[in-house]
């Protein structure tokens, strides 16, 4: 880790940079992930590096969609694995859903290293006193050649038959647009977290949370934990991803307060 002092006004952002660089050094994050992170940083700056009302609205709808899913799945790439491993495990626990490693840039051993990284954090979380009583611990599924997604040619097409292939709702933070489109064409719902409200993924997902994944994931876990009202189903019926993205764009352009 670098020696950024805690008093530095951009301490949190710089710490995240350290985390993603460490991910590359550990062979978890692709070198291309640094570029993706930089793009994210620029948009995070534009939304005030804070969870805005358009993100809170999306998180509420995402919690309902994921809770009401029959077979939810959490897709994990090299960036999110480095940035938020514990929150991913917690999300798997609160949803009782497996995690599935799925990466775009093929590199020998990276999928396995991501799996081991997640399992290490799962072990840590399960033995942490604060988390005592959490019984269900998510599996970490790996891609296979047995099941393949249609409409996509990249490495992302290789999936697990009991995971992404079977899922009705797929949670895919920091996604690239191609797979999001393929999943939608296959009739699946997609929940994503993407700081860029103009990305192809943001536009094509069923629900896009325009926020940093490190802030959004704990809030999503909390919202799912507190989910009890079946009336939330109605929220989903009227939810418009496009309208929420417009709120984010208005906020960024200075013509809206995010609500
Ligand atoms: O590990 P791999 O091989 O699967 O590769 C993962 C990356 C992220 C490199 C790959 O999926 C990729 O190239 O993604 P893109 O097309 O660059 O898209 C990443 C999107 O995530 C961009 O729209 C960024 O603005 C956004 N983003 C970056 N960092 C964050 C983020 N969104 C939320 N939280 C972040 N921390």
Image (cartoon, rainbow, N blue to C red):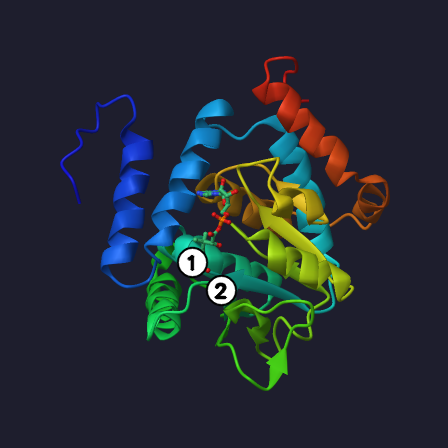
Q: Quadrant of the N terminus?
A: top left
- Looking at the image, residue 193 sits to the left or right of residue 214; the answer is right
Counting every numbered tag in the picture gives: 2
Whether 16 is drawn above or below 248: the answer is below
Whether 220 is drawn above or below 180: the answer is above
Give how far apart the Cα atoms at labels 2 and 1 are.
6 Å
**Which residue was labeled with disc 1?**
131
The location of residue 56, given as percent across then percent down, is 62, 34
Secondary structure beneath dot 2 equals: loop
Secondary structure beneath dot 1 equals: helix
The location of residue 217, given as percent across then percent down, is 51, 47
Confirm whether residue 216 shows in the render.
Answer: yes
Instruction: Specify the quadrant of the image occupied by residue 179.
Output: bottom right
Mark 2 burial class by Cα count in 10 Å: few <14, some 14-19, many 20+: few
Please identify the residue farthest to the top as the structure is shown.
255
Please identify the residue farthest to the front as the structure is shown.
153
At 62% from the left and 82% from the top, the residue drawn is 147
Q: Nearer the viewer, residue 137 or 180?
A: 180
Q: Quadrant of the C terminus?
A: top right
The answer to whether marks 2 and 1 mark residues whose Cβ atoms lie closer than 8 Å is yes
The location of residue 126, given as percent across then percent down, is 39, 66
The location of residue 5, given as percent across then percent down, is 17, 29
**Which residue was labeled with disc 2?**
134
Mark 1 burial class by Cα count in 10 Å: few <14, some 14-19, many 20+: few
Instruction: Specify the quadrant of the image occupied by residue 106.
Output: bottom left
Instruction: Specify the quadrant of the image occupied by residue 14.
Output: top left
Please identify the residue farthest to the left as the structure is shown.
3
Q: Which of 106 and 136 is in front in this view?
A: 106
Q: Nearer the viewer, residue 24 or 220?
A: 24
Q: Nearer the viewer, residue 203 or 244?
A: 203
């Amino acid at each position: 880790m670098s020696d950024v002092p805690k008093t530095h006004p951009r301490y949190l952002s710089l710490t995240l940079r350290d985390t993603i660089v460490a991910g590359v050094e550990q062979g978890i994050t692709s070198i291309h992930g640094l570029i993706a992170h930089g793009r994210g940083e620029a948009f995070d700056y534009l939304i005030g590096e804070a969870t805005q009302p358009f993100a809170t609205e999306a998180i509420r709808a995402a919690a309902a969609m994921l809770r009401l899913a029959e077979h939810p799945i959490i897709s994990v790439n090299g960036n999110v694995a480095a940035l938020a491993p514990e929150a991913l495990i917690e999300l798997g626990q609160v949803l009782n859903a497996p995690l599935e490693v799925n990466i775009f840039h093929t590199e020998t051993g990276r999928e396995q290293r991501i799996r081991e990284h997640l399992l290490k954090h799962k072990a840590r979380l399960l033995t942490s006193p604060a988390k005592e009583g959490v019984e269900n611990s998510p599996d970490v599924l790996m891609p296979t050649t047995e099941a393949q997604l249609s409409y996509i040619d990249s490495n992302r097409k290789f999936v697990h038959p009991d995971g992404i292939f079977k899922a009705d709702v797929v949670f895919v933070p920091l996604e690239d647009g191609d797979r999001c489109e393929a999943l939608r064409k296959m009739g699946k719902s997609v929940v994503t977290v993407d700081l860029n409200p103009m990305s192809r993924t943001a536009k094509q997902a069923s629900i896009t949370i325009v926020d940093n994944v490190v802030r959004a994931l704990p809030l999503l876990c909390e919202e799912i934990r507190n989910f009890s009202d079946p009336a939330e189903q109605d929220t989903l019926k009227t939810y418009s991803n496009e309208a929420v993205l417009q709120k984010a764009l208005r906020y960024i352009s200075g013509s809206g307060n995010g609500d």
